[in-house]
Structures are given as C-alpha cells and as structure tokens.
Image (tube, helix red, strand yellow):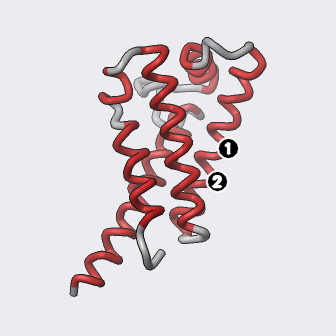
C-alpha cells in the first residue's frame, strides 16, 4: 500500500509541476486571456527584461525564448515519464534561476508569492526519488 501511495504521489508531483509550467507558457501565448499574468508574448518579454536587467538586451530576449523552450520540453518529459530524473533536475535548476532572478530584481516577496522556491524544491525532491 505504501509503495502504491508513493508511486501515485510521484505521478501527481510530476503532473503538478508540468501543468504549472505549461500554464505559464499558455499565459505568455495569450491562452488565458488578457486578465492573466502576461496575456501575450510582448508582456512576457518585457517582464523577462525586468528580471534579467543585469544581462545585455539580446541575452535578455534570448532568455525569454530559452525559458519557454525548456519549460515546454521539461513539462512534456515529466508528463510522459521520459527521463524523469533529468527533467526534474532541469526543472529544479530552471525554477531556481527564476527564483533568484525574481529575488534580485523584484525582492524576496515575489518568488515567495508565486511559490517558485517551492516548485524548485519539489522538482529536486522528485529527482531524488526512486522508482522514477
């Protein structure tokens, strides 16, 4: 029973992390409508520029594309169960970068309000689990 519960919890965690990231991707492509966080790609790029103010402009723009690409790839990997450990590590690193960037540019409260640290920790916890 405990093993089945553990397996179910791993699946739930994989899906929860992946859907959360895909929801953010959907937002930046306008799928959640204008009343969402970004609502469109231009607003997301502007937000990314704010978070990565310490980077040259071209790298800031590139980071918006790179983050989106990796969020999609890692999410698909997590949902499908393909190379879950690697996807979880990548997700943990990606979310940690988001959390650090948010902390540097917006202050401590922003990544806490959006549970970015929790998401990063959850991804690393998933990577550490057996029976992936």
Say which residue label 2 marks.
Answer: 73
Residue drawn at x 49%, y 40% as measured from the top left: 95
Along the line of sight, which residue is nearer the eye, 82 or 94?
Answer: 94
In the rendered image, residue 58, in percent from the top left (x then y), is placed at 78, 18
Residue drawn at x 26%, y 78% as measured from the top left: 5
Left or right: 10 in relation to 55: left
In the rendered image, residue 19, in percent from the top left (x then y), is placed at 45, 52
Q: Residue furthest front?
A: 128
In terms of secondary structure, where does tag 2 sit?
helix
Along the line of sight, which residue is nearer the eye, 91 or 73?
Answer: 91
Q: Residue furthest right?
A: 58
Is the residue under label 1 in contact with that under label 2 (CB below 8 Å)?
A: yes
Residue drawn at x 34%, y 37% as measured from the top left: 115
The quarter holding residue 84 reads bottom right
Left or right: 40 in relation to 2: right
Instruction: For the N terminus, give its image quadrant.
Output: bottom left
Q: Judge whether 125 appears above or below 103 on screen.
A: below
Q: Which mark is residue 4?
A: none
Q: Which mark is residue 69?
A: 1
In terms of secondary structure, where does tag 1 sit?
helix
Residue drawn at x 41%, y 24% as measured from the top left: 35
Q: Residue furthest left?
A: 1
Q: Residues within 10 Å of mark 2 (few under 14, many from 20)?
A: some
Along the line of sight, which residue is nearer the eye, 108 or 5?
Answer: 108
């Amino acid at each position: 029973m405990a093993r089945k519960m553990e397996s179910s919890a791993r699946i739930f965690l994989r899906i929860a992390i992946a859907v959360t990231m895909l929801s953010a991707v959907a937002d930046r492509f306008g799928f959640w409508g204008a009343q969402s966080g970004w609502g469109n790609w231009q607003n997301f790029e502007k937000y990314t520029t704010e978070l990565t103010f310490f980077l040259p402009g071209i790298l800031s723009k590139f980071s918006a594309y790179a983050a989106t690409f990796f969020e999609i790839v890692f999410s698909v990997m997590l949902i499908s169960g393909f190379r879950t450990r690697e996807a979880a590590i990548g997700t943990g690193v990606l979310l940690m970068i988001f959390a650090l960037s948010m902390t540097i540019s917006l202050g401590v409260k922003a990544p806490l309000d959006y549970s970015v640290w929790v998401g990063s920790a959850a991804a690393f916890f998933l990577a550490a689990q057996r029976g992936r």
